[in-house]
Amino acid sequence: MKTRAAILWEQGQDWSVEEIDLDPPQSGEVLVKLAGSGLCHSDEHVRTGDMVVPQETADMLGLKQFPMIGGHEGAGEVVEVGPGVTTLAPGDHVVLGFIPACGKCPSCAKGQSNLCDFGAFLLAGRQISDFTARHHSASGEDLGTMCLLGTFGEHTVVNEASCIKIENDIPLDKAALVGCGVTTGWGSATYAAEVQPGETVVVVGAGGIGVNAIQGAAMAGARHIVAVDPIEFKREQAMVFGATHTASSIEEATALVGEITWGANADKAIITIGVGDGNLIAPVMGLTAKGGRVVHTSVAPMEENEVQLNLFDLTLQQKQLVGSIFGSANPRYDIPRLLRMYQEGKLKLDELVTREYDLADINKGYDDMNDGNNIRGFVRY
């Protein structure tokens, strides 16, 4: 079939919206008609090169990351299923989880499906069933898909392992947001940081991930939640999602946290800035209390190896520094759970989307994100 999609032909280029050819689903795959897609920073990381596999590694593994269809935060309706699909049928509504879960590997068996072995193929852009492409340009060139999904298209073919079935009465545009940003932020607070009632929490970066980390900390019962962001609009929005205090810089936050905790400092800190920076670790650890924990959720450039960290402070004050992907959540369990919270009025999703765009305006959406004008942009089909 023919459909439209936004293609990134090379690193550093703009997204190009074109008609593509889409093959029918093969064994273990489904065809999904998407309602829309969130505009997440991770796709921008690919465009800028932060998440581009080094050429030497790509050649060794036989990978070809470009051209690729972007997008990994989507939801839609199943139109067709391939042979062997047992958990889905045409008409089912699904959220596409950006990490497929096989249910069989050691991580899945331990209840850590966000670390499923299928994650090794996220940037390869080919179907995990046979490592071939279902998406093709008008000229016949194979197209990769971001995180095996390619939600910057009106239709896509994905593996059954990437689909989480949801109730049909949940609005698909809201459900799409839970496929990445909401769960990643919320889980960073509730799972990775293990925020407890009465604690003081600092969230560094109040974008699409950060405001949901704030929301998660608030739901967990934190007493103080300090949102740190240089952009006034984002600091204002952070208050909507549960922040009790805001600061425009780490330096300002350090003084503020010292004041509101009588010098004890923050129990937990969560780093959710747009591009991870190793120079940020030491000052964030510095505003964290003895026995406190810093969660690093931000994506840094793949070859970033420099981190500023005082090891004496780490040991003598028994602090923790942990990483988290997908908020350390389990897609198949937590996505339906969060959507139930939304239906019950406990989770804010309606307030997340600042602006909506047509697919043809996707580059404007990323300009707005980079300029700090959006908490979350959304492309509606």
Image: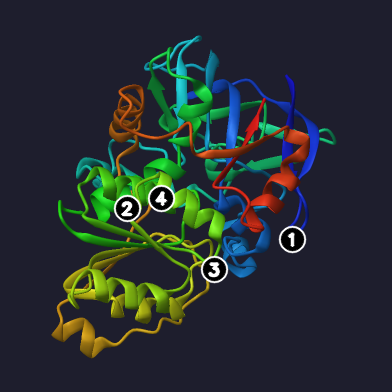
Mark 1 lies on residue: 12
175 or 286, which lies in front? 286
Tell me if mark 2 has few (under 14), some (14-19) or many (20+) residues whose alpha carbon lies within 10 angstroms of its own: many
- Residue 285 appears in which quarter of the rendering? bottom left
Q: CA distance from mark 1 to mark 3?
A: 14 Å
What residue does disc 3 label? 301
Q: For the residues carrying marks 3 and 4, which lies nearer the camera in this image?
A: 4
Image location (x, y in percent) of residue 262: 18, 75
| Residue 309 against residue 349 in the figure, above or below | below
Residue that badge 2 annotates = 188
Most extreme residue toward the bottom, as rendered? 312
The answer to whether 18 is drawn above or below residue 246 in the figure is above
Q: Which residue is mark 4?
A: 239
Above or below — where is 61 with respect to 18?
below
Residue pictured at 54% horizontal, 68% vertical: 301
Mark 4 residue type: Met
